[in-house]
Image (spheres, helix red, strand yellow):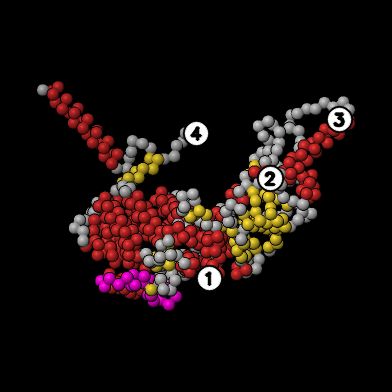
Amino acid sequence: AAQAAARALARAAAWATRAGAGAMSEGGMLAIDGTRQTGQDVRTQNVMAAMSIANIVKSSLGPVGLDKMLVDAVGDVTITNDGATILKLLDVEHPAGKVLCDLAQLQDQEVGDGTTSVVILAAELLKRGNELVQQKIHPTSVINGYKIALKESVRYIKKNLTIPLAKLEKSNLVMAARTSMNSKLIGPDSEMFAEMAVMAMQNVATERPDGTVRYPIKAVNIIKAHGRSSRESMLVDGYAINCARAAQGMPTFVKDAKIALLDFNLSRHKLKLGVQVLVKDPRELEALQQREVDITKEKIKSILSSGANVILTTKGIDDLCLKYFVEAGAIAVRRVPKDDLRRIAKATGGELVLTMVDADGSEAFDPEWLGQAREVSEERIGDGELIYIKGCVKTAAQTIVLRGANEYFLDEVERSLIDVLSVIKRTLETNTLVAGGGAVETALSVHLEDFAATLGSREQLAIVEFAEALLIIPRVLATNAAQDSTELVAQLRAKHAQALANNDTSLLFTGLDLVEGIVRNNYEYGVVEPAISKVKSLRYACESAVTILRIDDSIKLNPSDKPQ
């Protein structure tokens, strides 16, 4: 009996030990060296991190949004209201915060515009999803509801909210470009810059073998030149590089240019390190030095005899080589950035040459490596010179030369122009536009509330919250414009509810006029955006919110004390 009692006690102790270990792993202590957060605590922390990121960029949304000044560790200053740039420069440590920063970068790469709104929308979806979870609705039900709402939103945009256009006119592209620019620093000059950007993108159209037309943004080069007013910026039909001729004796203009694109030094030939030459007669030393000069001369003559009259290299050109180029009447340019050289090679049909040595060990320059252009010239802009390459044979290249008072202004104008070029590219490639100024978000919100009522499952609660979250965009737009957001959003909802009830499609384009503080048909006033911008921002915002809502456990390991 005593032995049986002892065995029972031992079993009870073992069970107690296991239960204690389980409790420890459920609580704060872990078998591993780190801290653990579970359930609602981790969700609340994630939502707080996302909201704090969204609050940073919230005031920069819209045509009257404010700018942010960011100073890095070195002291470099960036002044911008571009959401992607702001979040790129922030040193965010929280994992959920990093998801939103990556989200802005993704939107910037895919569409170019809408980076601020996608972050604000993702944070709002996350906040409302978290509130539903606190009301004892399972995260999976919330996630499923969000996915249904997203699918219905994309379907509704494509079917009802896209502006019916048989063919995109230039005026439509200018409208989309101006809408994107209105929220930037160059808003007051948006008409001039929009025309410039549309012309540049239309001129770089390239047709692929499968018949599709592409508009490469990299074919438009943007060069910043200090001085004068931004209204004196200009579009150049050709590729420009921020470099000058290597010698003053060279011509400033070459017609029917044959361009050699080199990625090696053009300098006097020298014997390799470690090579020893024993000379008994001083005249042999002179012959050795003369042979070095001759090798260099043969290399230059080989390039020039192939027909090249413009030489661009990423490395240096010394005085000996310059002498031959000046005598031949060719333009030589040194220290050209490699990225520029690659683009020039693509535009002119040339080849970037890394070495002239062939399989036999001899040096020769093949004329097939040469790029061709109608003309190459050097022109003075501001304090420096630019080399213009016009009439490229393969693909059209365009250059926008920006003028402005200081570096900060020029940097922000460049960022704005890249965004605008992306918007034009997407509009040209997709041929679909939607009305801006909160029109799409409000129309979707009203439609999703009706749609949620048709569902008899708990997902309808998540769809209603999704619909409410969409209204954050018109609300923030109105607040940033110092207007009464509650009244304006109520008027917007009323117009869109009327459109839905009466099947009046013209009212679906009703958005905000933030200057007058009224609602109007934004399509008639030229406030439009590419439909792909709205579709992608909804997709990315929903996916980010879902990714963070899925997290219910966070384990952070303590840093190791062991030496590396």
Q: Which residue is mark 4?
A: 563
Describe the element under mark 2 as helix, strand or loop.
loop
Q: Is residue 13 left or right of residue 96?
A: left
Q: Which residue is mark 1?
A: 191
Q: Which residue is mark 3?
A: 284
Instruction: Find the distance from the CA under tag 1 to the CA under tag 4.
Output: 61 Å
Describe the element under mark 3 as helix, strand or loop.
helix
Instruction: State the residue lying farthest toward the left.
Output: 1
The quarter of the picture where residue 244 lies is: bottom right
Q: Residue at x 43, y 65 (%)?
A: 167
Instruction: Find the distance from the CA under tag 4 to the CA under tag 2.
Output: 43 Å
- Where residue 125 appears, as percent x and y from the top left, is 33, 58
Q: Which label's residue is closer to the chain start, 2 or 3?
A: 3
Check whether the beta carbons of the residues at disc 4 and disc 3 lie within 8 A of each other: no
Q: Which label's residue is closer to the chain start, 1 or 3?
A: 1
Quick check: can you spot residue 490? no
For label 4, count other residues whose C-alpha is less than 10 Å away and answer few (under 14), some (14-19) or many (20+).
Answer: few
Quick check: can you spot residue 462? yes
Residue range highlighted in magenta: 501-520
Frontmost of labels 4 and 2 is 2
